[in-house]
Amino acid sequence: MSHPILTLDVLRAAVARGAAAIRAVTRLEPAGGPGDKVFPPTYVKEGKSSTKYAMELRNVGGREVQTVLLDSVASQANRMEEALLEGWRRDELSFPVIQVDFSAQDGLEDLERITSLTAPHRIADALLRDSVDAAGVPFRQTSIGKEFADSRPNHATKMYKYCPTALVFGVWDSTGPKGGLGAKFQRCVVSEIVGHDVVAGVKTASRIDPAGIEKKSGTVYEKRGEPGEWTSIEDEAATEKGKPKPFSRKGGGDKGTPAAINHGNIPPSIDAEAGGVTMSHATHTVVVSLAGLRRLRFQEDVNGARIPSDARDQAETAARTCLAALALAGVAYQRDNGYDLRSRSLLVPAEPLVFEVLDRDGGDPLRYRLDREGAAKLLSEAVSAATAVGLGWDAAPVTLTPAPKLAHLIRESRKLAAAGEVEENG
């Protein structure tokens, strides 16, 4: 059955007339076919857990089903943000972005531009906080930084103007000048991928060194005057407490052994804690909360003028519709990017992407289709409608540069990493 396209009129009516949410539930399967193993993300084991995976029993269709988390809400948000950023960079999608430009920073050019879509805490991230505008003013002290800090759900215009994706994916300015009382906006889109009818497996590992280097071949030392380099010649070794210093490297084997420099054999082993899983299928569930969007209030237009009371409903509906269209574009663009979640975890859809509009009073949902091109068109139309009522967007990026102290910190961190002097977890 072919469903109608999700148009601006449909979306605006859903936002204005009180639909509860828009959801998309898609069945996914391993790219290798039924029975192919996939590898979920790993976590620190706690309690009596037998694996490093987030496995739990869920009630699905009236029965208990063993499930595993394949992609978390936070990870999904990051993937949608990356997909939106791709669309923005190709001029297919138009919305505000704040970026920190590293391209002119000696030794940091490879970072290019870190944006409010790629920084972990979005507009509230420390990378933006510790950057400056063209006049050298720290971001938090600029007019944009101050307006962002003063934003709140019932006064959301400035956040909407400078970083609307934070209103979609959520943000909490907990490390700003107001501490825990800083700007806080809940997620309005929640997405996760879960595997069903899961059976945990095992993973094997081994390595035969073609050079025949044995573990007992001798001690490996840190080379004198060259941190991060090794030597097997004791006279060339650095010393520690008067003795030759055994070499060690993060991720390497036992200190001072050939394994520490990735030489030698690895005996065959079986890993039952992170050995992948087989499953009947996976489900990708996305929910865009229209009720959450309706909690956002817009007292002013983007130029700071008070919106007349008799025009507030129309203006707020237009702004919320823009945000809903932005969320749907994130879903559609992510779908187009595919489901290659990590190594050995490639999934493929078993059905087309369908969006369901859920009425707040129940009843059968209304179903619509929306692909990448349709999502871009929908967002463009929504922005045009919002612009007509004073709540348009400027897609030209706000560009910052890293403060000298931030650039120096990154360079020093890279020096330590290159020398192998990085902190061990735990």
Image (cartoon, rainbow, N blue to C red):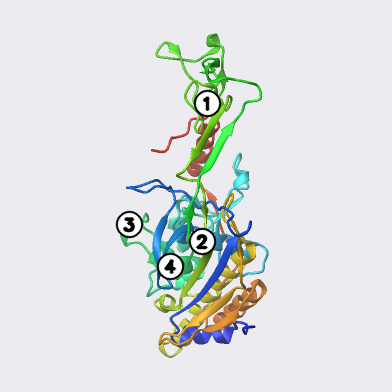
Tell me which amino acid carries mark 3.
Answer: Gly
Q: Which mark is first along the chain, 3 or 1?
A: 3
Proximity of marks 1 and 3: CB atoms separated by less than 8 Å: no
At mark 2, the secondary structure is helix
Residue that label 4 marks: 187
Residue 241, image quadrant: top left
Mark-to-mark CA distance, 4 and 1: 44 Å
Mark toward the start of the polypeptide (4 vs 3): 3
To which residue does mark 2 refer?
76
Depth check: give the residue in front, 108 or 325: 325
Q: Residue furthest top?
A: 235
Q: Residue 242 occupies which quadrant of the picture?
A: top left
Asked if residue 212 is positioned above or below residue 49 in the image, the reply reads above
Question: Which residue corresponds to the image point at 65% horizontal and 62% vertical from the top-left?
Answer: 89
Q: Disc 4 marks which amino acid?
A: Arg
How far is the residue under mark 2 from the one under mark 3? 27 Å
Give x and y (percent) for residue 243.
43, 11
Q: Which residue is nearer to you in this view: 189 or 48?
A: 48
SS of the residue under disc 3: helix
Q: Mark 4 or mark 2: which is in front?
A: 2
Q: Evaluate whether residue 173 shows in this view.
A: yes
Residue labelled with disc 1? 260
- Under mark 1, the amino acid is Ala
Residue type for callout 2: Gln
Q: Which residue is mark 3?
A: 179
